[in-house]
Image (spheres, rainbow, N blue to C red):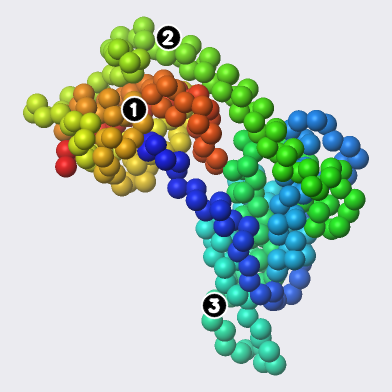
Amino acid sequence: MLRRSLPLALAAGLLLLTGCGGGGNGDDGQAAGASSLDELAPGLQQASYALGVDMGRQVAGMPGSGDHDVVIQGMQDMLADQSRIDFMQAREIMAVHAHDHGEGEGEAHDHPDTWTENGFASEQAQRSYAIGVTLAQFASMQLAELDTHALSQGLTDRLGGEELLVAEDSTRAIVTSFQRDLNERLATENLQAGQEFLAENAEREGVITTESGLQYEVLREGDGSAHPSADSTVKVHYHGTLIDGEVFDSSVERGEPISFPLNRVIPGWTEGVQLMTPGAKYRFYIPTELAYGQQVRPGSPIGPNEALIFEVELLEIQ
């Protein structure tokens, strides 16, 4: 909703978390290792492999990265939404220095033995899995589309010191070029889909289109006659979806309303909320030029040139 990207500044330090090694090795599960690729198809497969190589370069030597199968399993599970631990848990695990039991098995240490309760055979196995989880998050932020098979092999080849299918010094250029081409394609497709949706939506009964192209319908009228101005700070509940219904942000689902200045949000919000009075609930249909335009938002489901839908309840003008 805000002009700035969603809080994904986590990416900057995503691959920089380190700690001391510890525990045993190996996991009590089996990694879904990819079968070998002898050559790469240009485009998605090549870019995914290159990204895997680049990630392997960045984590090589990190405590836990030597358990390749477990790292790969953590990454694949996270990408498949089947991870044993979530991203924040993985960050916490990687930030904790593994203890040295020294001469006594029962020697005290400064962090809990979480690997048992999380279903891992050892502290080292949990750390390896956590690395994979963070890599999955990083990969999803780097490429809007991924070939998991190629990504896994690129990571495996780099961590294992195997001969690479792309030159290591070209990996970032390959990823950047593919993502640029992908963004251009998505921008064209999303623009056309949004325009078609809004043209059809404008014909529905109860939908009003303003001069700017913003569309809205009144779900519930508010109280009184006070409207916020563009400089007002408002408190709202909102639920945001793409035109296909995918939810990308929702204070309603979080159960926490939000306050913000109207001059700090996308133009569709600035215009639309000024139409409301406290207690009102509107649904806004926002064309891309009043939303984020061609802006690329890493890690967000909002692609370039997406039209957006928001249900907004104005709670108060502050």
The residue lying at 31 percent from left, 29 percent from top is: 269
Q: Is residue 24 above or below residue 288?
A: below
Disc 3/disc 1 C-alpha distance (Å): 47 Å
**Along the horizontal axis of the image, is 28 left or right of 113?**
right
Secondary structure beneath disc 2? helix
Measured as percent of width and height from the top left, residue 139 is found at 65, 45
| Residue at image mark 1 | 267
- Marks 2, 1: nearer the viewer: 1
Instruction: Kindly indicate the quadrant of the structure image that contains residue 123.
Output: bottom right
Disc 2/disc 1 C-alpha distance (Å): 20 Å
**Along the horizontal axis of the image, is 220 left or right of 225?**
right
Nearest to N terminus: mark 3 or mark 1: 3
Instruction: Identify the mark at residue 111; answer none if there is no mark.
Output: 3
Nearest to N terminus: mark 3 or mark 2: 3
The residue lying at 62 percent from left, 89 percent from top is: 106
Q: Is residue 46 above or below residue 160?
A: above
Secondary structure beneath disc 3? loop
Amino acid type at mark 3 = His
On the rendered image, what quadrant is the N terminus found in? top left
Q: Are the residues at dot 2 and dot 1 in contact (C-beta closer than 8 Å)?
A: no
- Marks 3, 2: nearer the viewer: 2
Q: Is residue 276 above or below residue 103?
A: above
| Residue at image mark 2 | 199
Measured as percent of width and height from the top left, residue 77 is found at 66, 50
Amino acid type at mark 2 = Ala
